[in-house]
């Protein structure tokens, strides 16, 4: 009987996958990888902040390799590409999408027709080449540019390798430069080596290995180290690389296949051999496009304008760049203990997990759409914590801002608690939950606990004894949110003691609420208020941070004088939508304000959430290079847009449910991993029809501006009846969204 049941389940899964594959739409046509590469026109904080900092190059979903152009003035842009730049200086193999500080851009390649008479190590940018955007295009898994010097470059990718086509002008000397900055070796048609990098902030070292194979012999091949060009085929130096020349008089095209690995050169070769064994550029490009199309088809939208679809699917595309693979094709990866580990077949170890950025909306989105993948991300965090504990006396905490196999210690708070709790709540539960809870509890309860040498919760001792971190309102609020999420996770696992402990500790925000100003303010250790109103906040202001009590908004709104006064404050707050950090109005280009537009729902004014969210969508998110309001931060901003366009938002960390807005599209279908679908219908949709007149969930009349995940987790339909004027829908105080205060021990 059991075997028969398993066969039936397998058959059902096969039918579900077949139906999904058969009903896929051509959605990559709506993705523009250049969206977010140009400074938006609203803030003036400098190009590293004003731009989405995404990259337009070739990458696969969750790809380890991201082969993309680096422009000349983008040193402080993590994506490496700044749209106003007139020149490209290289095409490097690794990139981070959306971070506000420089990182990665490892192993640059650069074709040139200039004579190489001095070492590229003396001035790499001397080989930069100007270009025009009219000679450039990109789509998921593909990038092409024709430089003004006549060299045309095309790039495509597999998860751990890439294939490049360099088309040089005929009858000219053609050279390809590779910068290794560690070690490089030439043998026959193969170039191998490694790059020695450092993680931003922490300075931790990492190594990325490569193996590049060419489709033709070199006319000349030299290495360089420092300021010297060498005749030898092996070079080692903090500034080294290869100089490869080709005779292009009869054949101007040079192909190169490159595999990378964080384990070894041999593994880079193996990744290349498995994923990219041939030279068929068109076939590989099509394979990458198909992989992206399958990912994008997890949400199918109908209706709306072409521009709406371009913004939506470009955002969804950005949501599947990070976290990305750390493990090789054979499952091996470097752990946080410095040793080589292996994942089980069918699973992955992930890297580039910025907790502060991703916990609000990206983690819930990925858990909903790909719970298996999300579970592996959670297990990756647990693995890092357990590996760290094995080699450090105070180690074993969760990495705050994980990159490659290290913890950068970037930003603040303990956001992995919220990532894990939210992922679990939304159904990503196939990971070591007990191990996760142990690591979360250790970091939150034992002062001095570290991850890769960085303290998990800076100032935890004061937070535990004083109920706040002296001089730090933002960090205190982060810890409150982290504690709340930890409490929900503990409760779900049946640990009532930890649930009560952390649920009550989450209310520490009340210790910093200043009734006289109506703001959250930092206190000194003696309990006095900090005099400088601009200190104590991270990438934001007191006016922006005061709303960061998403788990207990009922208590916050009451402290502000009730719903009407709180809603009036929100009205003023929304008079400007992207005013930058430090302002007393909204800064929707940063994570600190992601959850604020949805708070009207908790104040009995859901129509105002519907209105302001539609304004944000229309004014700040565009289908053009300046179409992101700020750093995308590994898909954080993009995931906000995806949820908002569906008319939903996961407002409370660690709680599976949605604050309600209104949908952009007449119909959206979420195709879940278990074969079920969630249909979101909006009738009739238009820019003006943003106001909910009526809502049904699975054909039941729905009066609450909050929908629990349990209502649709097994599949269902959410039907919005929309209009161009506010209605009384959602204002019944008996149907208010949930709020969570302290509990009795």
Image (tube, grey):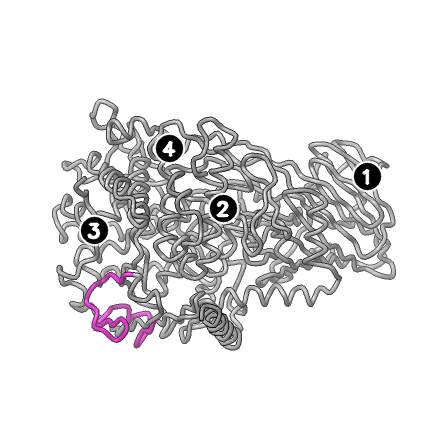
Q: Which of the two labelled residues, at mark 3 and mark 1, occupies the earlier sequence position?
A: 1
Up the image or down, 305 lies above or below 392; here it is below
Q: Is residue 86 visible?
A: no
Q: Which of the two labelled residues, at mark 3 and mark 4, occupies the earlier sequence position?
A: 4
Q: Which of the two labelled residues, at mark 2 and mark 3, occupies the earlier sequence position?
A: 2
Q: Residues within 10 Å of mark 4 (few under 14, many from 20)?
A: many
Mark 4 vs mark 1, foreground winner is: 4
Q: Are marks 2 and 4 in contact (CB under 8 Å)?
A: no
Q: Are marks 3 and 4 in contact (CB under 8 Å)?
A: no
Which residue in the structure is indicated by mark 2?
380
- Distance from the alpha carbon under mark 3 to that under mark 4: 25 Å
Which residue in the structure is indicated by mark 4?
457
Dot 1: element: loop
Up the image or down, 637 lies above or below 294; here it is above
Relative side of 15 to 206, left or right? left
Residue occupying the far front of the picture: 1
Which residue in the structure is indicated by mark 3?
739
Q: Which residues make up the magenta segment?
A: 680-708
Dot 4: element: loop
Viewer-nearest residue: 615 or 708 = 708
Q: Are marks 2 and 3 in contact (CB under 8 Å)?
A: no
Residue 710 counted in the magenta span:
no
Pick the quarter of the image with the N terminus. bottom left
Q: Give how far across and how far down residue 518 sits, in percent.
A: 17, 40
Residue drawn at the location 70% of the way across and 56% of the way down: 148
- Distance from the alpha carbon under mark 3 to that under mark 1: 69 Å
Q: Give how far across and how far down residue 205 sits, in percent.
A: 59, 33
């Amino acid at each position: 009987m059991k075997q028969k049941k398993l066969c039936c389940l397998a058959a059902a899964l096969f039918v579900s996958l077949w139906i999904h594959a058969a009903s896929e739409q051509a959605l990559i046509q709506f993705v523009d990888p250049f969206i977010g590469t140009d400074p938006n026109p609203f803030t003036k904080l400098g190009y590293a902040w004003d731009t989405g900092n995404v990259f337009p190059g070739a990458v696969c979903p969750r790809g380890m390799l991201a082969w993309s152009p680096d422009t000349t003035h983008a040193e402080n842009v993590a994506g490496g590409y700044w749209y106003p730049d007139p020149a490209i200086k290289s095409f490097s193999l690794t990139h981070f999408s959306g971070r506000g500080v420089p990182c990665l851009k490892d192993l640059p390649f650069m074709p040139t027709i200039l004579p190489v008479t001095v070492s590229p190590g003396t001035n790499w940018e001397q080989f930069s080449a100007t270009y025009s955007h009219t000679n450039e295009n990109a789509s998921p898994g593909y990038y092409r540019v024709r430089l003004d010097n006549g060299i045309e470059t095309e790039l495509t990718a597999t998860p751990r390798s890439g294939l490049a086509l360099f088309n040089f002008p005929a009858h000219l000397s053609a050279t390809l430069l590779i910068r290794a900055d560690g070690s490089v070796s030439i043998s026959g048609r193969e170039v191998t080596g490694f790059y020695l990098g450092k993680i931003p902030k922490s300075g931790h070292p990492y190594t990325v290995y490569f193996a590049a194979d060419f489709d033709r012999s070199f006319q000349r091949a030299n290495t360089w180290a420092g300021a010297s060009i060498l005749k030898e085929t092996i070079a080692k130096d903090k500034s080294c690389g290869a100089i490869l020349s080709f005779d292009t008089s009869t054949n101007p095209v040079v192909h190169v296949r490159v595999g990378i690995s964080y384990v070894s050169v041999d593994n880079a070769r193996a990744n290349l051999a498995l994923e990219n064994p041939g030279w068929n550029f068109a076939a590989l490009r099509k394979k990458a496009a198909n992989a992206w199309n399958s990912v994008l088809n997890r949400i199918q939208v109908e209706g709306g304008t072409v521009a709406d679809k371009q913004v939506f699917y470009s955002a969804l595309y950005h949501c599947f760049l990070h976290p990305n693979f750390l493990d090789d094709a054979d499952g091996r990866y470097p752990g946080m203990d410095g040793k080589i580990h292996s994942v089980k077949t069918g699973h992955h170890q992930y890297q580039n997990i910025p907790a502060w950025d991703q916990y609000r909306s990206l983690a819930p989105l990925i858990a909903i759409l790909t719970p298996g993948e999300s579970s592996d991300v959670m297990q990756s965090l647990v693995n890092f914590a357990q590996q760290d504990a094995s080699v450090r006396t105070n180690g074993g905490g969760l990495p705050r801002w994980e990159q490659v196999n290290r913890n950068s210690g970037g930003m603040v708070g303990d956001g992995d608690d919220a990532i894990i709790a939210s992922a679990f709540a939304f159904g990503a539960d196939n990971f070591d939950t007990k191990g996760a809870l142990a690591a979360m509890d250790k970091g939150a309860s034992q002062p001095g606990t570290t991850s890769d040498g960085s303290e998990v919760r800076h100032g935890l001792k004061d937070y535990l004894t004083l109920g706040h971190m002296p001089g730090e309102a933002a960090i205190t609020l982060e810890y409150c949110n982290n504690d709340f999420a930890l409490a929900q996770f503990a409760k779900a696992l049946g640990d009532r003691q930890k649930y009560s402990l952390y649920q009550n500790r989450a209310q520490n925000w009340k210790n910093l609420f200043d009734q006289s100003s109506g703001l959250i303010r930092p206190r000194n250790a003696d309990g006095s208020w900090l005099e400088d109103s601009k200190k104590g906040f991270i990438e934001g202001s007191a006016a922006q941070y005061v709303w960061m009590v998403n788990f207990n908004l009922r208590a916050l709104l009451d402290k502000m004088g009730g719903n009407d006064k709180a809603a009036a404050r929100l009205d003023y707050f929304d008079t400007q939508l992207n005013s930058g950090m430090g302002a007393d109005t909204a800064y929707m280009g940063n994570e600190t304000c992601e959850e604020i537009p949805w708070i009207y729902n908790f104040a009995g004014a859901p129509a105002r959430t519907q209105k302001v969210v539609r304004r944000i969508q229309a004014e700040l998110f565009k289908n053009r290079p300046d179409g992101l309001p700020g750093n995308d931060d590994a898909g954080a901003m993009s995931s906000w847009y995806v949820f908002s366009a569906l008319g939903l938002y996961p407002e409370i960390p660690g709680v599976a449910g949605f604050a309600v807005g209104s949908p952009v599209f007449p119909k959206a279908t979420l195709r879940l991993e278990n074969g079920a679908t969630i249909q979101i219908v909006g009738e009739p949709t238009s820019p003006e029809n943003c106001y909910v007149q009526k809502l049904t969930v699975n054909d039941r009349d729905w009066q609450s501006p909050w929908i629990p995940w349990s209502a649709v987790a097994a599949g269902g339909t959410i039907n919005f009846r929309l209009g161009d004027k506010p209605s009384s829908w959602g204002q019944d105080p008996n149907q208010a969204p949930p709020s969570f205060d302290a509990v009795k021990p």
